[in-house]
Image: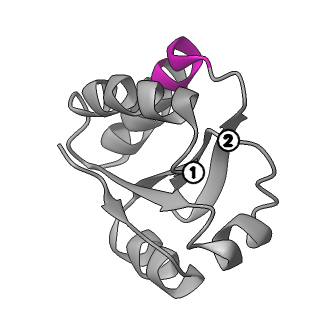
C-alpha cells in the first residue's frame, strides 16, 4: 500500500466526501521518526482497506498544516464521516491508533 500525497484542503475535502474514513499522515522529508513510522502505519492500515490514507508533507502543504495547527511531526489525523475523530502527534502510539481505528471501523460497519 502506498499513500498518495495531498497538498490542499480541496483535495482533502474531496476525499472526505467520497470516503467514510480518511487518515492523513503529516510528515517532513527530513524527519527520521516520520520515515520509520510510515511503514508500520501502512502495515496497520492493510487490515482496513476501507480507510483512504494519504500523506501531507509540511513543506509542500502549508495550507493543510496551518488549517489543522500541525506544529510537530509525525502527526496523524483520522476523519470519520468527515469529522476529525483522532489526532496523534509527536510521540505516536500505534496501539492507540489501532484501537481507535478498530472502534470506528466496527461502528461504521454496524451501521451498514
Q: What color scheme is it? A: one colour
Q: Which residue is mark 2?
A: 73
- The rendered magenta stretch, by its main secondary structure, is classed as helix
Contact? badges 1 and 2 (CB < 8 Å):
yes
Q: Earlier in the sequence, mark 1 or mark 2?
A: 1
Left/right of residue 2 with respect to residue 84 in the rendered view: left
Name the element at disc 1. Answer: loop
Question: Where's residue 41, x and y in %?
Answer: 39, 29
Please give the name of the residue rendered at 58% of the width and 38% of the height, measured from the top-left corner: 31
Asked whether 112 or 53 is in front, the reply is 53
* Label 2 crowd bin: few (<14), some (14–19), many (20+), radius 10 Å: many
Q: Look at the image and tell me in which quarter the N terminus lies.
A: top left
Q: CA distance from mark 1 to mark 2?
A: 7 Å
User: Which residue does the numbered mark 1 point to in the structure image?
Assistant: 28
Q: Is residue 75 left or right of residue 14?
A: right
Number of numbered discs on residues: 2
Q: Nearer the viewer, mark 1 or mark 2?
A: 1
- For numbered disc 2, what is the local secondary structure? loop
Q: Which is nearer the eye, 107 or 30?
A: 30
Q: Quick check: 20 left or right of 7? A: left
In the figure, residue 58 lies in which quadrant? Answer: bottom right
Q: Residue at x 46, y 21 (%)?
A: 98
Amino acid at each position: 500500500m502506498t499513500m498518495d500525497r495531498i497538498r490542499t484542503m480541496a483535495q482533502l475535502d474531496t476525499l472526505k466526501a467520497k470516503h467514510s474514513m480518511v487518515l492523513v499522515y503529516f510528515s517532513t522529508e527530513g524527519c527520521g521518526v516520520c520515515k520509520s513510522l510510515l511503514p508500520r502505519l501502512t502495515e496497520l492500515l492493510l487490515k482496513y482497506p476501507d480507510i483512504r490514507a494519504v500523506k501531507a508533507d509540511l513543506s509542500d502543504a502549508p495550507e493543510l498544516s496551518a488549517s489543522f495547527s500541525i506544529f510537530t511531526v509525525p502527526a496523524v489525523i483520522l476523519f470519520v464521516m468527515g469529522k476529525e475523530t483522532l489526532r496523534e502527534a509527536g510521540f505516536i502510539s500505534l496501539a492507540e491508533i489501532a484501537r481507535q481505528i478498530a472502534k470506528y471501523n466496527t461502528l461504521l460497519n454496524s451501521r451498514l
